[in-house]
Every structure is written in C-alpha cells, then in structure tokens.
Amino acid sequence: MTSANDILNLIQEHDVRFVRFIWCDNANVIRAKAVRTTFIRDYLDGEGVGIAAAQQALPVMYDALAPGSGLTPAGEAHMRADWRTFAVLPYARGHARVLTDIYAGEQPWAHCPRSFLRRMIARAAERGLQVFAAFENEFSLLRPSDRGPQPFDTTVFCQTWALDQATPIINAITEALEAQGIQVEMTYPESGPGQFELPVRYADALRAADNQIIFRETVKAVAHQHGALASFVPKIYPDKAGNGAHLHFSLQRDGHSIVVEPGQPHQLTAEMRAFMAGVLHHLPALMALTTPSVNSFKRIRPRFWSGAYTCWGIGNREAALRAPQPSAGRPITNIELKTSDATANPYLALGAVIAAGMDGIARDMRLGEPVTGDPADLSDEERAARGIRQLPASLGEAIAALEGDEVLLDALGDDLARSYLAVRRAEWEAMKHMPHEEEVRLLLERY
Ligand code: GLU
Ligand code: MG
C-alpha cells in the first residue's frame, strides 16, 4: 500500500480522522504526532512532520534534556512517512498510523534509529546478506485495583486457567495484529504472574523492527480496552520470571537461508558461526542497546533463563545465544539472542546486532564450543578456560562497555552514539538507587 491515492482512499473508506506519525526515541518511548486528515495531502510527500531535535535527548523519566547529548532546545528534524507501513488502527476508531524515518533537510537525520537500522541492513547487503528477524515478546497483564495494578493471574507456566481468564484479551490482540499484517504463531501463559507470550512470524530486519513497534502498541492498547494494563517492563516482580523479548535472527543469500550446512561444525555455516561469534564478542557492549534500562539488569540473572553469560548452546535456555534443538526433518532455522528485552528500541537493538554479527564475519571470528549445561554450574576456572564471561550486572557496566566498543560506536556514528549514551547515562544516574517499586511505577506504562 504505497501510492498517495491508495492512502487517500483508505482514509476515506475507514473515515480516518487522524494519522499518527510514529517515532521511537533513544529511551524507546513510542511517540506520535497525529495529523488531521483534512490536511493529510500536505504530508503525503515533502518534508513531513516536524519534531524538536531535542526529542532524541529525552530519558525515560521526563521530558527534559539529558546533559551531554549534543542536542539543544534549538533545531528541528522531520518525520517522513514510510507509507508502506500505513495501517488503519483496529483498536482506535478514526485513527491510522504510519511509521517514519526522521530527516534533517534532505538527508536521513544522524540521530534517527530507523535510518541506523537501514544503514546496517545495507552493510549486510554489501556482503550479499539479508537479515531476517523476529522479536519474541513476553509481557505481563495487570488489573487496576485500589492498591495499584495487581497481576492478572497467579498461575504457573502454560496453566490453562491463565488462558481461560485472558481469552478475550488474547483473541482481541491476535485479531488486531493480524489486521495489521502481523502473523501470530502461538500463544501461551508464561511462568510469571499474569505473564503471556505471543510469538509472531519472522520478517526482513526492517519489517521485524517495525513489527515490534506495532506489537507493543497493539498489546497495550487492546489490553487497555479490556480494562487491563499490559506491560513489557523486564522485571516487575523481583523474585518471579522476567519479560524477555528474545531476538531471533537468520541470514539469507539470494533468497536462500544460509543458517545450516551439513558436515559443518554443529551443522552451522561458517558465516552463521562467525556472525554468532561477533554477537557474543560484542555482547557486553551490545547490552546497552538490547537490554538498555536500569530495570533490564534485574532480569539478566543466572538461573532465570535469560542469558547471563557470553556463551552459546544448542537447545540451552541459559545460554545468551541459543540455537534451537534440531530434530529429525527440522534443522536449525534461526538463532535466538535471549539477552534482549522490550525496553530496547528495536531499530537500535537489531541494527547493533547486525553490526556485531557483521564484524564477526569481517574478522572471521571463531565460535567456541556450545555449552551443554547451565553455565552457572561451571567453576570460575572452567568458565575462564572456555572464554565464558559473566555479562554486565548493571546498566552502568554496559554503558562502560559500549563506550569502549569502537565497532558499535562507529556503526552508530558520532551523533547517535553521543545522544544515545547521554540518555543511557541520565537514566542510570536517576535510577541506580531508586527503590524497585518506584522504578516499576515509573516504567510500567512507558513500556
Ligand atoms: N522469561 C524468560 C526471560 O526472561 C524466558 C523464558 C523462556 O521463554 O525461555 O527471558
Ligand atoms: Mg518465553
């Protein structure tokens, strides 16, 4: 759906009053300015909808500039609609939305996350590679109460009673996603209180990141229509399972998967192994982009199936990188990064994963042996001997790792690296000593 006429027809047909121009910022807050459709012709092409450049300097806590971002209250950038992403919103009558690239004049803006992902996709394409991906989200449903939001259920993993209580919400989310072109593959209650998982079909990298924005928007809005609050905050309940957004990825060349190759170590192609080695090599720094909030690090703990060490495994849910267990007739189709959650801006997270993986390929990095058991059960000496490092335990440590990672900084570019790190640092300083309840209260409706 791309031509101006198509858009105008859809607007008329569905009685659309507003078109939301959506962007996702360095704090991973999804924002929109909505254009009244009587004036939409002015925005079909041309410079688009203006936003303050300072928008890319806002931390999650409030609308005030993080120091050191390189951005000031002066200056403007413009959201240009990618009309292929236009959709009438199934959960907001009279509203449609379109995802945008942010421009400075005629050029993509250096601080634009979606343009960063486009650059990394192009970098992979220079080697003839196409990246495919899917974010596999877990989220928590809560009910409002006088005592604040309470978990929707207190069930355990896959307990059907949780599905029975949430059937109308899960069905409505599924219908709304499918109406927006996202294919739902499965759903089940996850381990935590009120926790659900709803994996969706993979897509090319740009579409996969777009899908993550659409998914988060849809889940929150539809749950709200049913009187519930859906939240993607990684760790709401300190001693219960956290919410991951595992990042699944695969590589293609000329339209064919190049993940597996019989006869190769672990049946994985040399390129796939090097890509994985690159991701593991950069993972401590990558975490500042894939698990970027103060809260994220409460989830990444040994023995919570969230990937706390730089290792990979086959069918191993404690490994940061998991190759799904191959079975007869079903080879490995993709690799899963567990060290990822939905407080990550999907364009930055996926773009950085591609940058790390492509560095692994460019430098022909070696993937070590897979870990078979729980890496937490190995002694310190065994882990050291196998090159397995414990991942950063706090956002502060991940920021320091990113500050020292020339490859990722170079991929982001000076401007985006600067504004992004300024936002991370501001969040770390504001929240590092914040009591857990206060932190969750602050984040619960942001993500
Ligand atoms: N909830 C776990 C996490 O924090 C993942 C559980 C699983 O699906 O393997 O990532
Ligand atoms: Mg899960």
Image (tube, helix red, strand yellow):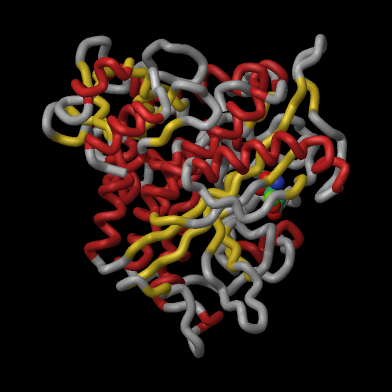
Toward which corner of the image does residue 55 lie, by quadrant?
A: top left
Expressed as whole percent of the image width and height from the top left, the position of residue 429 reads 51, 20
* Total numbered circles: 0
Left or right of residue 436, residue 287 in this image: left
Residue in the foreground of this view, choosing between 56 and 193: 193
Q: Residue visible at 67% across and 16% down?
A: 438
Expressed as whole percent of the image width and height from the top left, the position of residue 374 reads 73, 62
Q: Is residue 336 above or below residue 385?
A: above
Left or right of residue 166, residue 102 in this image: left
User: Of all residues shown, which one is farthest toward the front?
Assistant: 13
Toward which corner of the image does residue 393 lie, by quadrant?
A: top right
Expressed as whole percent of the image width and height from the top left, the position of residue 164 reads 83, 41
Q: Residue visible at 47% across and 83% down?
A: 261
Q: Which corner quadrant holds the N terminus?
A: top left
Q: Residue visible at 11% across and 32% down?
A: 106
Q: Which corner quadrant holds the C terminus?
A: top right
Residue in the foreground of this view, choosing between 156 and 165: 165
Q: Residue visible at 36% across and 48% down?
A: 206
User: Of all residues shown, which one is farthest toward the left?
Assistant: 106
Residue in the foreground of this view, choosing between 399 and 334: 334
Residue in the foreground of this view, choosing between 188 and 7: 7
The answer to whether residue 280 of the structure is visible from this angle is no
The answer to whether residue 3 of the structure is visible from this angle is yes
Q: Is residue 89 above or below residue 380?
A: above
Left or right of residue 335, residue 299 in this image: right
Q: Is residue 39 above or below residue 318?
A: above
Expressed as whole percent of the image width and height from the top left, the position of residue 56 reads 34, 24
